[in-house]
Image (cartoon, grey):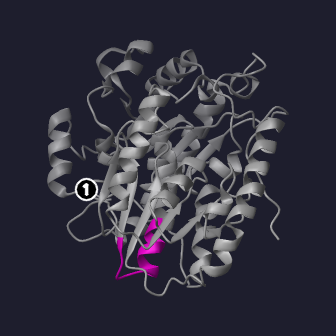
Amino acid sequence: MQRPFYVYRRWHKRLTAFLFDALGGLFFFPARCFSGHLTFEKVKRILVIRLDHLGDVVMTRPALKALERIFPEARIDLLVSEETAPLLKDSAAPGEILAAKNHWFGKSVKPQIQWAGFFSLLEILKKKNYDLAIDFRGDLRNILLMFLAGIPLRLGFGITGGGFLLSHQGLYDPRKHRVELNAELLKFFRKHFELKPEPFLYSEARKKEFWARTGMIPQDGRRRILIHPAASCPSKQWPLARFQRLIEKIREENLGRIILAGTSEEKKIFMPECGGEILDLRGETSIGDLPVLIAGCDLFIGNDSGPAHIAAAQGKYGVSIFSGTNLAEAWRPWSPRLRLIGRAVSCSPCEARVCPLGHHQCMEEISVDEVLRAVKSVLNELSQARQAADPSPLEKNAAPGAVP
């Protein structure tokens, strides 16, 4: 029997989850004995839950695409947050995108509103009559949602408790890359599948509209270096003063045209002193514009963030400055073209929003010169690839009428 694994750091939370599972397992044992053997042979309607963060959604797409190949006749709906739904407008599975508002991963949503959102979602899902639901995160609230919606086949990880409510529980390895860990839940289907990068798609018309809005020519022959200087939390943030110095050095050495990506709030926090030489698109673009913007640039530079994962999915070359907040081997952008810069520190992974020790050693020890060397190295690699006229596999596999 699989030993329960819980992601909680505090012992009393692990104990609570263990007792909850032990009592729940005893209570539901008779029902399991008489429920019969559930099979995947007649699955026609599938729900995939990915309500959390942008990077998590990106890293789920290879498994989602594999799921489409395993069940070619099934309708696959995707439940995501209202914030990330626009990213999937042209890249959806053969089904519906369900955009959840006031979900339990919202940063500023009050608990009572979160639970109101939970029961509102529950009523919607009950009417959909799903045969199968998959929660790739392993969240107790997601598991409860699948169970209370009456979905007979429920796949997931019981890492926060509630594993006894799943019909099939995956083996969770915290050191495995999340793209590969997601695929663990597909092994229950006992069918061959591959994991491949899945670029976000968009129409040619959308591409032209975007670049017309920015005032830039889509391809003007000059290298474009996209920089996303912000992070989702302070523990993942490389000092902004060093981003400023990096931008200055890139301009001094004429390595390319700099474009800044981010939100209008991030623009208030960091304003590089480089005048009109920089195209500042922070606050000017939406999350749905990111694939178009990233695909139109040559190099991506940023922290551990959602845009870094999108750059990896689009097959772009880049440099990712990775803190010790999470295990790099498990959470790094899934691409050989994205160079990772980080420090192995004894306190990693802390999984904290703010450095608990106060020194932020994992980011403070990364110098501007080190990042600049990586940028030059990647640009050189990009130039060699172009000279060899080696087309990207992502371009070969693009869907008709859509651009990766």
The question of residue 71 being in magenta is answered with yes
Q: Up-down: is 282 above or below 306? A: above
In the rendered image, which quarter contains the C terminus? bottom left
Location of residue 269 by image quarter: top left
Give how far across and how far down residue 308 sits, in percent: 49, 43
Residue at the spot x=64%, y=72% of the render? 31
Label 1 Cα crowd, 10 Å radius (few <14 / some 14-19 / many 20+): many
Secondary structure category for the residue under label 1: loop
Is-magenta flag for residue 403?
no
Residue 117 rendering spot, x and y as whole percentages: 39, 40
Which residue has dot 1 on it? 202
Q: Position of residue 360 (x, y in %)?
A: 72, 21
- The answer to whether residue 229 of the structure is visible from this angle is no
The amino acid on which the numbered mark 1 sits, given as a three-letter code, is Tyr
Where is residue 26 shown, x and y percent of the image?
A: 75, 63
The N terminus sits in image quarter: bottom right
Front in this rendered view, residue 224 or 176: 176
- Number of numbered discs visible in the structure rendering: 1
> Residue drawn 61% across and 56% down?
178
Between 377 and 157, the residue placed more toward the observer is 157
Comparing 47 with 118, the one in front is 118
- Would residue 261 be visible to someone looking at this image? yes
Residue 355, image quadrant: top right
Tell me where the magenta segment starts and ends, as one range: 64-75
Residue at screen point 41% across, 20% down: 266
